[in-house]
Every structure is written in C-alpha cells, then in structure tokens.
Amino acid sequence: MKDEAKRDDNPELLPDAVTYTTLLKGLGNSQDLYSVLKIVVEMKSSLVSIDRTAYTAMADAFLACGSIDGALCIFGEIIKQAGDNKDLRPKPHLYLSIMRAFATIGDFDMVRRLKERMWPDSVGSISRSAKQEADELLMEAAINNNQVDVARRLLRRIVNGKEHFSWRSRVGLVALKVETLSGFTNSPLRPHVFPQILLNDPVEKYMIPFRESRPLGADLILENVAMRFLKDSAVPLVNDWGSCVGIVHSRDCTKMDSPLLSMARPPLCVPCSTSLEHVIDLLLREKCEMVVVVKSGNMYEGSYTSSSRPLGVFSLGILSEATANTANTHDECVPGAAT
C-alpha cells in the first residue's frame, strides 16, 4: 500500500487506522512483539489519526505478547491525552484487559487501583458482567499474592452476588484454588463430604425402590395430601396403571384446590447404569430435587416413556441423609465434636 501510494503519488492509498489495528491484532495473536513495536512507532510517526480504538488495539497487542510495560505505556498515554480530548477516554474493556495481566502475576495493589479508577475514568456503561469480572480478577490477584484470607472474603462476596459459574471458567479455577487453600472448615462454599459415596458408581446402587418413595396418585387434590409436602421436597406421581407421570416439588404447590398433576413437572429419567456424578450434575443443572431411575437401556435422559419401567428414585435428599449419617458417625468417633 505504501509503495503504490508513493509510486502514484496518491496519499489515499496509504494505510489508515483500520489497516494498522488489523495488523496489530494479527501480530498480537502471533506474539510477535518486535513487529508490534515497529507498527506502533510507525503509526505515531505517520499522519494517521490515532483514536480510542487504535490505542486500545496497541495495548491489546502488547498484552497478547506478554508485554505489560508496553501496554501500561499506551494506557498512560491515553489517560494523559484524555484530559484534553474526552473522546480518548478508555472503555472498561481496556481496564479489564490490563487487570487480567496483573491478576495473573499477583499484583493485588495494581488490580485494586485499576478497579477503583475504572468507574470514574472510563467512558460508556459498565455492564454487570464487567463489574463481576473486576471482583473476580481482584480475588485472583489476591490468591496469586498468597493473600488467602482476602481471596476468601472476595469469593464469599462473589458467590452471594453470582447465580452460578462453571468450575472450568477462569473464576471457577481461581475459586477451586481458594477452596483448596482454605480447607473445608473455612470454605465459603460450605462443601459436603461424602466418604461413603463414589461418584463413578451407578445410580442404581444409591437409589431407593420406586414403591418406597410412596408415589401419590396424579388425580389427588393438593388439599388432601398437603401434609406430605411438609416432609418431602419432591414426590413422584403415578397414574391408574402405575406409570410415573410427573414429579411434584413442594415449592410448586401453590393451588390447594387443584390436582397434583397440574403442578407437576415432567419426570426426569435416567437409566440405572448412569453414573452418580452425572445424576447429581443433572439435578443441579435442571434445578430439580429428584430423578426417576428406569431400566430401559435405549434412553439416557428425558421424559418418561411407557417402555421404561421405573425401578426407583434418587434425590438430593438422599445426599443430605448421607451427610447427616457421616456427621453422626464422626461425632461418635470423636468425643466432644460439635454438630
């Protein structure tokens, strides 16, 4: 482009800001720091108008190459020039990008300062996810700086304000590290230990027989069996032929004069060979209390069918009982242990 512009004496063919930022992104992805530096110097010495997007592309390229110092130089230049040109004020994206780099190396103070300045100094709205990530990065910086108590307090705040997160995500991996260093007694996530349960075992080993779950008739009126739901958080329903047609959760029981079937959810079914780990994940993901264990081998999870006979049920209540049993056993073995 530069050769053509020089040969034809046509400045319109010279690279513009879009060309340079595209190059910076590619060179950053290739972690070619030397070429990134070369392009940045060329941009500043050319007639190209460097706007907020171009400055952000420079900083992102330096960070992709592992050069925090280079990104900080660009960031400082943006902040300095933004005093005279409000259009150059950085967006939250740039703050978060730099905070990620400092969180990785455990620079807690720098992450905290950037988090504090992101609100007054950035431009545009700060989304809820950006606010959450700022807290998560502060926790990551704390744990990487061996400030376990600080990280634990931040994790407790994150757990209270976040509906869920994946253990495989960045915050999940950091939370796992906090959990490991905190131990069960100081854990903000209140973990349960199940020494009598193996997650690879089939669910059939821990289920209770379907009859022992005391299923209710689907056409019964809630008013006539309301006391049952004071004890059980979920109850299976059967029709006149004994087939499971739904699961009623106590929190769904809102109409005393209605039949149970009108408040039931479709039964969540798994084959008896399904691992306990998968069943627990399924219950938590679907926010259900109970699954129906069936014999049919040609279905994995889904709605109950007439070809799948109900063998039993498994619920989160069974896990709670396992926790209680473990606590009782521990109390008997250790004199003076607190419940």
Image (spheres, rainbow, N blue to C red):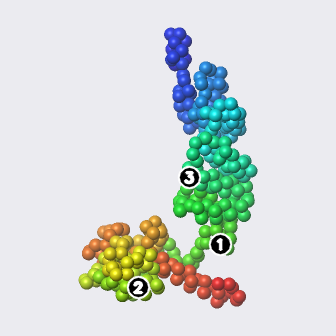
The reply to whether callout 2 and callout 1 are in contact (CB within 8 Å) is no
Quadrant of residue 301 within the rendered picture: bottom left
The residue mark sitting in front, 2 or 3, is: 2
Determine crowd level at label 3: few under 14, some 14-19, many 20+ residues with C-alpha closer than 10 A: few
**Residue at 54% across, 24% down:** 16
Cβ atoms under marks 3 and 1 closer than 8 Å: no
Residue at the spot of label 1 = 184
In the visual, does 172 lie left or right of 278? right
**Rendered location of residue 15, percent (x, y):** 54, 22
Label disc, if present, on residue 129 of the rendered structure: 3
Type of the residue with mark 3: Ser
Gap between marks 3 and 1, in whole Å?
Answer: 29 Å
The C terminus lies in quadrant? bottom right
First of labels 2, 1 by sequence position: 1
Sequence-first tag of 3 and 1: 3
Tell whether 214 sits left or right of 171.
left
Q: CA distance from mark 2 to mark 3?
A: 41 Å
Tell me what residue is drawn at x 41 percent, y 71 percent. Answer: 274
Q: Secondary structure beneath disc 2?
A: loop
Rendered residue at 46%/66% (across/down): 285
Residue 220: % across, % down:
32, 84
- Label 2: which residue? 226
Element carrying mark 3:
helix
* Amino acid carrying mark 2 in the image: Ala
Give the crowd class for mark 2: few <14, some 14-19, many >=20 residues within 10 Å: few
Along the viewing direction, whichever of 183 and 77 lies nearer the viewer: 77
Q: Amino acid at mark 1?
A: Phe
Instruction: From the image, state whether disc 3 or disc 1 is nearer to you.
Output: 3
Residue at (61, 44) in percent of width and height: 92
Q: Give the spatial CA distance, label 2 vs label 1.
A: 38 Å
